[in-house]
Image: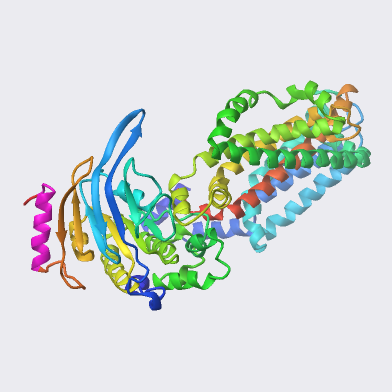
Amino acid sequence: MSNVGQTLDAGAGTSSPLRLRGFQQAVWTNGLLAAAAWAAAALVTVGLPDVVPWGSAGLFAAITASGAAILFVLSFVVHRLGRFTAGALYYGPWLIALGVWLALWELTTAKFGWLPKPFFSPPHGLLNVYVAEAPRLLICIGYTMRLWSLGFAAGVAVGYALGVALGWSKSFSYWGMPVLKLIGPVPATAWIPCTFYFFPTTFAASVFIVALASGIPVMILTASGVGSVNRSYYDVGRNLGADDWYLISKIAAPASLPHVFVGLFMGLYYSFAVLVVAEMLGAKYGLGWYIQFQTAYSGYANVYATLIIMSLICAGLVKLLFVVRDRLLSWQKGFI
Amino acid sequence: MAASATVLRPLHPARSGGSQSVAIGIRGVSHAFDLAGTQLPVLDSIDLSVAAGEFIALLGPSGCGKSTLLRLVSGLEQPTAGSITADGSRIDRPDPSRILVFQDPTLFPWATVWNNVATGLDARGVLKQERRRVDSALDLVGLHGFANAYPHQLSGGMAQRAALARALVNDPGLLLLDEPLGKLDSLTRLSLQTELVSLWRTAGFTAILVTHDVEEALLLTSRVIVLSERPARIKAEFRVERPYPRHRDDPELVALRRQILATLGLAT
């Protein structure tokens, strides 16, 4: 690269660096490397025998080989894909790392047995779980999403309403804040004994645990958001003839929204963290229940496979929340 | 900026001429702030009458309590002692007929300019019938092209125009201006000074302007009240009997300016 600098400094012809750049544009080097890594993962999977059979090795090899083929083709056409180009180029290093990671993972687990069964699983072992357990896992996803959405929605609704009241009303804050500060740090799961007594069904108790985990951060952040609204906004509102309800709904609510979203993100993570425990309470299906069930039988591959599903769902919901936030808070752009 | 060339027109020309302007009576008003248990007196027995349709200025050292007096007149706060009346009836709460315009535009950042201006009508539940008034208020301040903009997209002068439109859409009988041009650049400031005068002359509301700028007070108002250091008392009063539009190099205004600066202890 120092040659480039020298030729530019000398003011001489720049044809050679230009031609080099032209070649880089034509062929995506990272794409070729990624294709090689993915192909290596496929070859390792079918070429070497498993120490202990895991199943689905052929399918996994087929998937990684197809990945390698796609990456190989992309290496030559990636610059002609419009909007997709920038994304592909950006994730190039990650695609290489992923292929290398899959190949090493295969070698250390299934092929050499350095990380043995049942504590570790090769990638095709996880794939085998999805193939063999698909119907049951789909039911579990359905049950978990029902529990999560009921709990999260209830927690957010109650947490938001109480948060607004805490941030707005002096007397509510006088009685509520100390209680909130005391119970806030208590893990939601510590309430399990009480919930068994208070709730008619174990499902209702589980919903309560999830609601508590997601509601408390929303409540705290909403209260602080409403409490920190610029007082002049209320002066303007009162001067223009607004009553208390108008001040709360049309000024405090939108003004505190940036804080509320921080609470929503925290609540989302906490609610996922307690899902496994909430599904301990006499559930018949659900990803958390499935994880515990498989842990008891040393089905660790199933546990890992389920954890991946849970983190993908959580990441998807976080992404969704970001989209909603960006839409609702577009007025913040250019702020600070 | 095309907007700065626009001259403000009254929202309801038919009602101009001061028919709905408000007379203010301030009788023996004292006020103190409660700071961690100790009383900090800010106003000391202020007596002041403002005739309907009059435009007066309050001048005084920084922190002397001018803005507090405006807040009391708006009804956002109640005086510790004394009484303030609007057309003879006691002011005990804020009301859209008396609107305070702050040094900061304090527009709601989450609402478009149109929705900001509509706040007063919306809060009183008359927005549905009166939507056109929002548009005319925006026209009035030269912001018709910016109805859908958000406050962060406006320049300082445009934001202050939007704040003025938000006040004027309610047809106030009294406009309380708390250094409304204080943070603007000098060119925008000059053009808005002219517009404020023409707006006041045609719309005919009563106006009280708090300012640090002696020249601004002399260009805009017919009476300048000079306040003392905190706790503020009325120190002197100057009548400015010059026709509009006024010019800053008018020898009478220059003489008055010197007198006022001397009263403030800034003689040259």
Residue A259 or residue A313, whichever sits in front: A259
Q: Which residue extends farthest bottom?
A: B14
Judge whether residue B254 is colored magenta.
yes
Q: Can residue B20 be seen in this view?
A: yes
Residue A45 or residue A187, whichever sits in front: A187
Q: Which residue extends farthest front?
A: B88
Q: How is the image coloured?
A: rainbow
Residue B77 or residue A131, whichever sits in front: B77
Residue B54 or residue A227, whichever sits in front: B54
Image-based side of B220 in relation to B258, left or right = right
Chief secondary structure of the magenta span? helix
Tell me if residue B69 comes above or below residue B132 in the rendering: above
Query: Where is residue B131, by image quadrant?
Result: bottom right
How many marks the image carries: the answer is: 0
Q: Can residue A265 be seen in this view?
A: no
x and y percentages locating residue A212 in the rendered image: 71, 32
x and y percentages locating residue B198 in the rendered image: 29, 72
x and y percentages locating residue B233 in the rendered image: 20, 45
x and y percentages locating residue A173 in the rendered image: 56, 32
Judge whether residue B201 is colored magenta.
no
Image-based side of A29 in relation to A8, left or right = right
Image-based side of A146 in relation to A174, left or right = right
Q: Residue at x 58, y 25 (%)?
A: A178
Q: Name the quarter where the N terminus of chain B is drawn.
A: bottom left
Q: Residue at x 24, y 53 (%)?
A: B48
- The stretch in magenta equals B251-266
Query: Where is residue B156, by image quadrant?
Result: bottom left
Image-based side of A169 in relation to A233, left or right = right
Q: Which residue is drawn at 57% across and 46% down?
A: A257
Tell me if residue B104 comes above or below residue B148 in the rendering: above
